[in-house]
Image (cartoon, coloured by chain):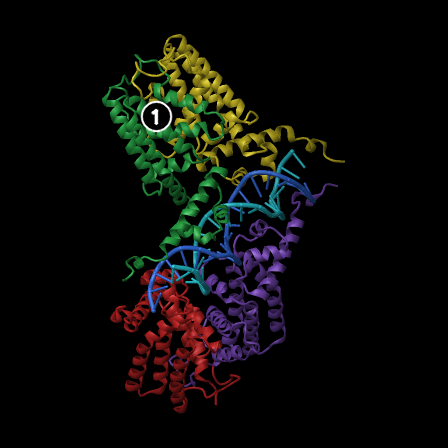
Chain colours: A red, B purple, C green, D yellow, E cyan, F blue
Amino acid sequence: MTTPAASRPTRTDAQRNRAHIIAVAEEGFADLGVEVSMDAIAKRAGVGAGTLYRHFPSREALVAAVMEARSPDLERERVAIEDGESDSRVALERWLEAVSAFMRAYDGLPDPLRSALREQGSPLAPTCRDVIATTDRFLAAAQRDGHARKGIRGRDLYLGTLAVVWAAGTESADGSVEQGLREMLRSGWALSGEGAAPAS
Amino acid sequence: MTTPAASRPTRTDAQRNRAHIIAVAEEGFADLGVEVSMDAIAKRAGVGAGTLYRHFPSREALVAAVMEARSPDLERERVAIEDGESDSRVALERWLEAVSAFMRAYDGLPDPLRSALREQGSPLAPTCRDVIATTDRFLAAAQRDGHARKGIRGRDLYLGTLAVVWAAGTESADGSVEQGLREMLRSGWALSGEGAAPAS
Amino acid sequence: MTTPAASRPTRTDAQRNRAHIIAVAEEGFADLGVEVSMDAIAKRAGVGAGTLYRHFPSREALVAAVMEARSPDLERERVAIEDGESDSRVALERWLEAVSAFMRAYDGLPDPLRSALREQGSPLAPTCRDVIATTDRFLAAAQRDGHARKGIRGRDLYLGTLAVVWAAGTESADGSVEQGLREMLRSGWALSGEGAAPAS
Amino acid sequence: MTTPAASRPTRTDAQRNRAHIIAVAEEGFADLGVEVSMDAIAKRAGVGAGTLYRHFPSREALVAAVMEARSPDLERERVAIEDGESDSRVALERWLEAVSAFMRAYDGLPDPLRSALREQGSPLAPTCRDVIATTDRFLAAAQRDGHARKGIRGRDLYLGTLAVVWAAGTESADGSVEQGLREMLRSGWALSGEGAAPAS
DNA sequence: TATGAATGAGGCTTCATTCAT
DNA sequence: AATGAATGAAGCCTCATTCAT
């Protein structure tokens, strides 16, 4: 008696809807930062707040979904570096730049990323883990080749990069501040030879 | 015979009140972070919201006042280092640690500090300038002695330290994360000899 | 078999709620004037402030809704006059009295009505337009019959009536002040024969 | 022991102060309307709020003082009309225009003027009384010469003029709205000969 | 008398989230 | 599954007026 075809259009529809919300949220984040109101995103997406929350039970979940949607780009970067860069030090540098861009995409993004690092259960945690894992790989290669200090872990580099992105903010038109900080992160401020931790 | 101080009455009381608000705000920041509501601070201080706003027309102004109240501590640190530390590299390290502690005092403090660096008119700007100026002095000494790279400025170091404090957050009980990051800020992740910026 | 009305669910409830808020606001305006606080109305209506603002994003919108709810009364007046009054002069007089009552309903109502006349985008503008249009119709009939000066427009009469209502205020128990002013509006203070605008 | 000369500089000083406040309030009203905050006026005047309130215990009192300060201008107008205008109808018209200008000086001024008409004890009442008295005189002359209806009193004309000024508001750049309304107040909207109150 | 600090109620508005339909 | 109405706590801030000094 009910229309059977209409009763389960959802599977596909829902996914379409989900993808649409993500795309719209991406725009919203880009325009207004990740702190944009959930209502505003629902409105932009043309769905009710309830639908938004059905798909993404919290703002963090939405941020995570957007970031996951962007992950393939980062993966492509990774592959490109791995395929084209023989120098493991330069490879690590290029990777960190790519990660920076990933983190810098929206105003306010560094905050949830930092939280995700602490809260094991955060929806953003998997993405962070992936990025850290890749960072670990690039870092290990660099360390193996004597290009990077031994005591450092991918997570430290990730957090340092995040800190740099936070410090630079979204507002500086030119990226000079960020570049300067990233350079300091790489070389440190101290002249080598007398540091407290002169590497491995 | 005439009261020479009569030209500025009530001030004593108001200043007492002001000082009280600052003390209470300090507590509030420590308990709940700098994002604590202004109303909550007014309530804690036992004054009306209007009184709070008369003294501190914005949250930033209140943060600035609290930080200024803490400045003498930092000054004492500075003097202690200058008086007791002959090694300019160690002096700079100790100073940066003191600055870290200064910045780390309240949850969320790094955010207004970062803003103050951009907005010239921020009430926090003077405090930032002072700290940067001192950093410049310690850094210059270290550079003169060949302990620090020449291209770096106090402002960079200040911002780097701020970024580290932000990244570490207030929550980590032990300061290991912060120490790790600070160490990375000092030595960099790259092994020397092949960096893009081989120092002065 | 399918629920055709299903395409617009919940609406019924929301409209009930909306109507309730309007009724309560009407009371509130009557008791305390249109300047009554939005919070007070929300409280009276037993809804959260947010609900109030969802339905009526501004005080003007709420006033407009209340006035629209009262419009049918005015319409009924109009029909009664049109149906029962053959003398176009008396018809216009009766209509202006009805409009006066419409405008006099709440303390402070003339102010938003005056604003709406200036700000095209005001939520009250449509109601004003309607009333002015009807006034134009009654006025045209009176002018056609030689009962009203030709140079006058409905809008002028509307504004004049509004001014009279404002001047009389809500407070005077008897309407003598208003009647006097309305009479002056009709006949003017000058004795005819020497006026600057000797009619059509 | 106290300096006797300094102990009573007040008489003159206070009056100077009072005059200064009035002048400043006049500016403030002109710039921001009569609803300007009392604090703002005190600040502009360079006095404490307490001083302001000592001289003028309420906003109305301050408005009244400013209007009283402007009264001589109106008096001069009156004298000029009385001296130069032989036609009592034109004299009344000119006087009402002068009164309009008096009432139109500041945004929001009509409101306290209206209140003063109702509240016997209002500080503005004397000024109103004076203006009404003069209006009565001009009106009586016009009535005596058959230029104005007999049933009207100065108070009605005053209130009508006030209503017109209120309706026109401060915002209309050209005074066309006010002129139109004032004209309607003079001639009425009805064509003579059939009015309900065809004057004496 | 002048000062200006203090009051503190009260206004407006936003928003994450829940829930009835 | 989708909708969007409802919640209601909070936040921020202003201002007329009083009062201690």
Q: Is residue B188 visible?
A: no
- Measured as percent of width and height from the top left, residue C8 is found at 32, 57
- Identify which residue, D53 or A69, lies in the foreground: A69
- Furthest residue in direction bottom, as rendered: A144
The residue shown at (34%, 80%) is A94
Instruction: Give above or below for B92 relative to D77.
Output: below
The residue shown at (33%, 87%) is A87
Q: Which residue is mark 1?
A: C94
Q: Is residue D12 visible?
A: yes
The residue shown at (56%, 67%) is B106
- Furthest residue in direction right, as rendered: D1
- Identify which residue, C57 or D29, lies in the foreground: C57
Label 1 crowd (10 A; few <14 / some 14-19 / many >=20): some
- Furthest residue in direction top, as rendered: D145
**Subunit of mark 1?**
C
Q: Is residue C55 left or right of residue B75?
A: left
- Measured as percent of width and height from the top left, residue A157 is found at 43, 80
- The amino acid type of the residue labelled 1 equals Arg
